[in-house]
Amino acid sequence: MAIIKHKSQRVGIFIDTQNLYHSAKNLYHAKVNFGAVVKEALAGRVLIRAVAYVIRTESEEEKGFFEALNKLGIETRVKDIRIFAGGAKKADWDIGMAMDALAMANKLDTIILATGDGDFVPLVDYLKFTQGCQVEVIAFGKSAAGTLREHADDFIDICDDPKTYLIGYRGGSSTGKGFFSSTFSGTQPSAEEGVDVGTEVYDDDTDEA
């Protein structure tokens, strides 16, 4: 179904940072340019809120990344990483991101979810059919859930033009599965750069469609 993106539409963008990070790292060995993601998704419309859901690690090395997002006009909602007895680490923002989208729905015409996680399909349907919002998704098509693509009013596939959305993209790709952890270098990005944060984060919910 073709949709119309009116310039006067009030837009809220909700960014599943972990999902995009892991997809970029797994598929392209590159980092996400979140500024480019927001710009493309917004498509010249009225931005009301852009929120990135991020994880704070013990070292807090990701502080520079959070500041870079803020300079781009992207708010950050921060959650501390959970460390379990066996040493496993987990961070999950799914419920918080969904609750924020629901809470803001009556002030928005369009809600954009930057994620490929199929767990958000019920949220997409609720926002469309109960709240009357236009719901769009921007994500990596190679790792996004097919049901999420089908239920969204529009789907922007980052894989169609990775050089626009990625930093460090060299034209290669990987289709490997099961990428359940990543080592983040801790480099502080500039306002134009993507994610480069923290330590090892284990989050099964954000790694598979």
Image: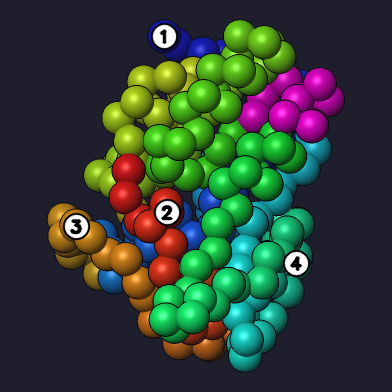
Q: Is residue 115 left or right of residue 50?
A: left
Q: Is residue 45 visible?
A: no
> Mark 2 or mark 1, which has the lower sequence index?
1
Distance Cα–Cα, label 3 vs label 2: 12 Å
- Asked if residue 106 lies in the magenta stretch, the reply is yes
Which residue corresponds to the image point at 62% horizontal and 63% vertical from the top-left?
54
| Eye-nearest disc, 3 or 1 | 3
Which residue is labeled 3 in the image?
A: 177
> Mark 4 or mark 3, which has the lower sequence index?
4
Q: Measured along the vertical axis of the image, is residue 165 above or below residue 122? A: below
The image's colour scheme reads rainbow
Q: Quadrant of the N terminus?
A: top left
Magenta part of the chain: 102-111
Q: Amino acid at mark 3?
A: Lys
Q: Is residue 26 visible?
A: yes
| Eye-nearest disc, 2 or 1 | 2
Secondary-structure class at tag 3: loop
Which residue is labeled 1 in the image?
A: 1
Residues under numbered marks 3 and 2 in contact, where contact means CB atoms less than 8 Å apart? no
Distance Cα–Cα, label 2 vs label 1: 28 Å
> Mark 2 or mark 4, which has the lower sequence index?
4
Q: Measured along the vertical axis of the image, is residue 147 above or below residue 158? A: above
> Mark 3 or mark 1, which has the lower sequence index?
1
Residues under numbered marks 2 and 1 in contact, where contact means CB atoms less than 8 Å apart? no
Which residue corresponds to the image point at 59% horizontal and 34% vertical from the top-left?
112
Which residue is labeled 2 in the image?
A: 206
Distance Cα–Cα, label 3 vs label 1: 31 Å
Residue 71: numbered disc? 4
> Mark 3 or mark 2, which has the lower sequence index?
3
